[in-house]
Image (tube, rainbow, N blue to C red):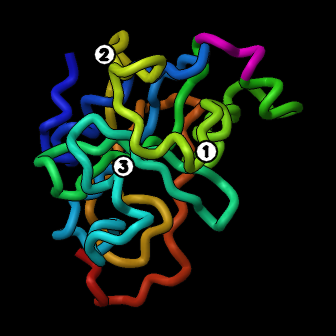
Amino acid sequence: MLDLTLPAVDLAPLLVGALLSDGGVTVQLTEVEAYAGADDPAAHAFIGLRPRTRDLFGPPGTLYCYLSHGLHTCGNVVCGADGGGSAVLLRAGRVVAGLDVVRERRPGVPDAALARGPGNFGRAIGWTLADSGRRFAVGNLALVPGPDSGTVLAGPRVGVSVAHRRPWRFWAEGDPTVSAYRASPRIQPGHLDW
């Protein structure tokens, strides 16, 4: 059983290897990132409650979805204290069930890249913004412990321009589904770098 009331930075490494299922597709998580709510300048919660972040401030076990670059639906597991705005971004995974469904959603993409990167993960699962606010363990949406994923590594989060040195990205060592690290081109040295 996964304790979704844990703080994001404590829950995130425990999610590497977990199995997320929805709509006939199951993905074993291989990469995640922690965002610590209102105290984390890189988190959506940092600016406070807004209509588009309403689900982020929901109870632990809520799915929070947002659009990246206006195109890609990214999913997060809300965790920690109820109303705290903490979440774990689902960055990458290996499709372990429903592979044919995912291949239809992402034709011509190699299997290792089907759910690599948070937007591709959302596309592989089939999420849209309408899925935000759903609850894990209700209906088809499930998140359960999976098999041992081996060594879990930690490093800086991908693409954030503030608090970028926090080693809150966690991934399965050597797994081909893990995305490449890219620093944000907007990083300003010394500006909220921790």
Q: Looking at the image, is mark 3 or mark 2 earlier in the sequence?
A: 3
Tag 3, which secondary structure? strand
Depth check, mark 1 against mark 2: the one in front is 1
Counting other residues with Cα less than 10 Å from the Cα at mark 2, is it few (<14), some (14-19), or many (20 or more)? some
Q: What residue did someone put label 3 on? A: 33
Q: What residue did someone put label 2 on? A: 145
Which kind of residue does numbered mark 2 sit on?
Answer: Pro
Q: What residue did someone put label 1 on? A: 128
The one nearer the camera, 159 or 75, is 75
Q: Residue at x 67, y 39 (%)?
A: 123
Which kind of residue does numbered mark 1 sit on?
Answer: Thr
What type of secondary structure mainly makes up the magenta span?
helix
- Is the residue 23 above or below the residue 160 in the image? above
Q: Which residue is drawn at 55% across and 79% down?
A: 185
Q: Looking at the image, is mark 1 or mark 3 earlier in the sequence?
A: 3
In the rendered image, residue 37, in percent from the top left (x then y), is placed at 22, 62
Quadrant housing residue 70? bottom right
In the rendered image, residue 143, in percent from the top left (x then y), is placed at 36, 22
Counting other residues with Cα less than 10 Å from the Cα at mark 1, is it few (<14), some (14-19), or many (20 or more)? some
Tag 1, which secondary structure? loop
Q: Which residue is drawn at 33% across and 20% down?
A: 137
- Taking 182 as reference, is 72 left or right? right
Q: How far is the residue under mark 3 from the one under mark 2?
A: 17 Å
Q: How far is the residue under mark 1 from the one under mark 3?
A: 20 Å
Q: Give the range drawn in magenta.
A: 97-101
Which kind of residue does numbered mark 3 sit on?
Answer: Glu
Verify whether residue 100 appears in magenta. Answer: yes
